Image: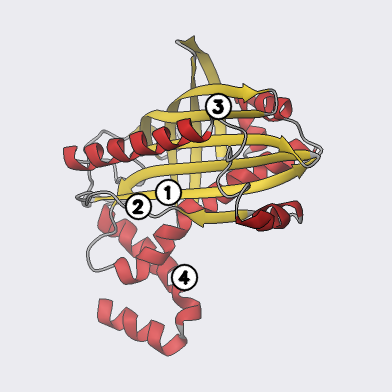
Amino acid sequence: MVRGMRRLVWRFGRSRVLSVARWVWVLAGVVLGVGGAGLAVAQPNAAAVAGYDAYVRGLEGRLAVQHRSDLGFLVGVDTMGGVLRDRLRAGEFVVEPVAYAGPELPGAMLSHWRATAFVPGARGADFVRLMQDFDGYPKVFAPEVLAARGLGQSDGRTTMTMRVRQQHGITVVMDTAYAVSFGQLDAGHGYSASRSTQIGEIASAGTRDERVLRADEEHGFLWRQNTYWSYAERDGGLYVQVESVSLSRAVPRGLGWAVGPFVEKVPRESLEFTLRSVVKALRR
């Protein structure tokens, strides 16, 4: 069957790879056990978790250094002769992958993306107010965020929960919990970190049969996710940059040629949607 799908891509051209990938991803859903008694994957193995945790420590170490000075507070904005700043001030959203250079993660896939935008007239205080209004997330991030609320603070971190829905060929609903923290270099430069503490996949969401899947029933669409925001007031507005790193199940063997481009597209589109939603809210 894989050879047959390869012939389809060859016949119709690479421009239609993603449309074919959508079809194969639905098929992959069956392979992964969506909607039936398939090959569910409980949780990432210890080696994958250790690799992810090590990568996150390195990323957070780099961000800690980055946030010590207003020069270089945002990746790329203060370098390359101002070219990136010109693109951002012209209204472009710059979204780029960050290459993973760590050890192999058995049975898992790590995705790391960065996105940057400029919001004329916005201030750092506007961003903080927006991001700390957890109850308002369903309005700001609709239709991906279905529900959200803050549960209180402890040790400088706020615990919050969200129900999120991802629709990419198949629909996946997850209940998630995050530990969120905020910090500042000064009034015009700040940052936040959101680290997942729990992610549960929901079956039959919104029906009377709704339930949280057991660990041995889950499909590994998302095991871990951390999101890091940085902002800087400059040039009459606010530069906003977000980095997201996530851990999910690896693409099933034999389907990488078709599913791979689609799977890689999902975290990029999700991050860009998040940034565009924030920018839209700040412009109101």
Q: Circles 3 and 4: CB distance less than 8 Å?
A: no
Quadrant in which the N terminus appears? bottom left
Q: Amino acid at mark 3?
A: Ala
Mark 1 and mark 4: span between their CA atoms? Answer: 21 Å
Circles 1, 2 touching at the beta carbon (< 8 Å): yes
Q: Give the mark nearest the N terminus, 1 or 2.
A: 2
Q: Quadrant of the C terminus?
A: top right
Q: Which residue, given by chain and number where applicable, does mark 2 sit on?
A: 100
Q: Which residue is mark 3?
A: 148
Q: Earlier in the sequence, mark 1 or mark 3?
A: 1
Point out which mark residue 112 bears: 1
Residue 68 position within the rendered picture, expressed as x and y whole percent measured from the top left: 53, 29
Q: Measuring from the top left, give residue 123's x and y in whole percent.
A: 75, 31
In front of the other: 19 or 242: 242
Distance in Å between CA atoms under marks 1 and 3 = 24 Å
| Element at label 1 | strand
